Image (cartoon, rainbow, N blue to C red):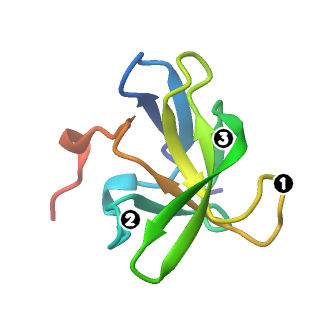
Amino acid sequence: LQIHEFCVFHCRRCGVHALITDCDLWEMPRRKTDKAVVLDTSKWVVRSSMVEAPDVEKVRRDKGMEKQYNHLCSSCGQRLAYQSHAHGSTDGKLMYIRETMEIPWHKKKTP
């Protein structure tokens, strides 16, 4: 029997619980483009109370346009995370966590 320690992450704007996972987000890699934390949802337990944004956001990058399918705070509508594949798609397993999600860096484990 393996026991998981779950972490709860909040919206930085209103403080509502947004994401619960057994992943230490502070140990995950970051994207070079926008410094978003990369969370592989196929490797970690992820439960979200975020709302899927109905529209796709297009962001200009050095290599062209990038489509972002946003996840919003269920209370205040703040953009907290995004993925590169349409909501409901089985293609994308990566979720990108924005700086607008409260990540408690003080809980980072030190060696």
Q: Secondary structure at mark 2?
A: loop
Q: Which residue is mark 3?
A: 47
Tell me the crowding category of disc 3: few under 14, some 14 to 19, or many 20 or more residues within 10 angstroms, Cα based: few
| Label 1 close to label 3 by CB (< 8 Å) | no
Q: Secondary structure at mark 3?
A: strand
Lateral position of residue 65 relative to residue 35, left or right: right
Q: Find the distance from the CA under tag 1 to the CA under tag 3.
A: 15 Å
Please, what is the three-letter code of the amino acid marked with disc 1?
Gly
Q: Position of residue 15 (x, y in %)?
A: 41, 18
Tell me the crowding category of disc 1: few under 14, some 14 to 19, or many 20 or more residues within 10 angstroms, Cα based: few
Please, what is the three-letter code of the amino acid marked with disc 2?
Met
Q: Earlier in the sequence, mark 1 or mark 3?
A: 3
Q: Which residue is mark 1?
A: 88
Residue furthest to the bottom in view is 63
Between 54 and 98, the one nearer to me in the picture: 54
Q: Earlier in the sequence, mark 1 or mark 2?
A: 2
Q: Which residue is mark 2?
A: 28
Between 31 and 103, the one nearer to me in the picture: 31
Q: Position of residue 64 (x, y in %)?
A: 51, 78
Lateral position of residue 6 relative to residue 92, left or right: left
Q: Earlier in the sequence, mark 3 or mark 2?
A: 2
Q: Position of residue 22 (x, y in %)?
A: 52, 50
Please, what is the three-letter code of the amino acid marked with disc 3?
Arg
**Quadrant of res 10:** top left
Q: Find the distance from the CA under tag 1 to the CA under tag 2.
A: 24 Å
